[in-house]
Amino acid sequence: NAGVMQNPRHLVRRRGQEARLRCSPMKGHSHVYWYRQLPEEGLKFMVYLQKENIIDESGMPKERFSAEFPKEGPSILRIQQVVRGDSAAYFCASSPDPGYEQYFGPGTRLTVT
Amino acid sequence: GESVGLHLPTLSVQEGDNSIINCAYSNSASDYFIWYKQESGKGPQFIIDIRSNMDKRQGQRVTVLLNKTVKHLSLQIAATQPGDSAVYFCAEKLPGNDMRFGAGTRLTVKP
């Protein structure tokens, strides 16, 4: 059973470009969570999605950031017009149920130049 | 907003000693807690969890203790090994399924 997959593992974007981060949850998991982590800091919750629905996006900036989890395919975290402050590691986690442990992917490290 | 905090940002122990990592949580309604281990360049890895109807849970070399009276969580690692060196996060599940992580404690094991 493959774990949570994220790609790309590393992404470099210039200021103003768009970044698309993909997350494929574990098989059988329909709950996906996105987190952001700055160096030497903890994980900051961004958004929680179920298939085709955003359940909680309270941690996600209102502008430039969006997330989706379509019926088919991976969950996508999209950052438009990236700025240097968006540089961070973005982790995706999935769970079979919101009351259970979350399994994390290896993360995507975004660098904005 | 509410957050989970840690008493010690860094902890250094001798190989073979026991380690205790502490965590204070702020929401008395949180009903599920997890400890994660994160090695450099990797995603967090589940270690052990505990629900609020328990006060202790044991795994292989690890024990989690929950004190709901003072909203305190601890992770005990027995016979700490070099491979235990990592950042350890506690997380609480808030009402509404939101998971909140603490800033983490860096554990360094000296040979």
Image (spheres, rainbow, N blue to C red):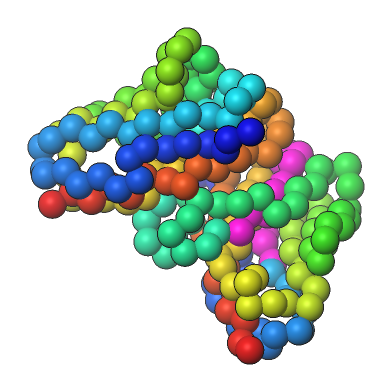
- Left or right of A85? Residue B55 is right
* Image coords of residue B79 (percent x, y): 78, 78
Quadrant hosting residue A96: top right
Pick whichever, B20 or A77, lies toward us. Answer: A77
Q: Is residue B65 visible?
A: no
Pick whichever, A49 or B99, lies toward us. Answer: A49
Quadrant hosting residue B85: bottom right
Quadrant hosting residue A29: top right
Q: Quadrant of the C terminus of chain B?
A: bottom right
Check the image and report above or below for A72 versus A81: above
Residue at point 68%, 25% (across, down): A97
- Left or right of B109? Residue B80 is right
Residue B3 is covered by the magenta coloring: no
* Image coords of residue B26 (percent x, y): 65, 50
Residue at point 60%, 25% (across, down): A27
Residue at point 74%, 59% (across, down): B73
Check the image and report above or below for B85 versus A46: below
* Image coords of residue B46 (percent x, y): 66, 50
Q: Work out which residue is located at the far front of the displayed protein and give it.
A: A1
Check the image and report above or below for B80 versus A37: below
Residue at point 55%, 43% (across, down): A104
Q: Which residues are magenta?
A: B22-37
Q: Is residue B23 visible?
A: yes
State how many labels appear: 0
* Image coords of residue A42 (percent x, y): 48, 56
- Left or right of A76? Residue B77 is right
- Left or right of B14? Residue A62 is left
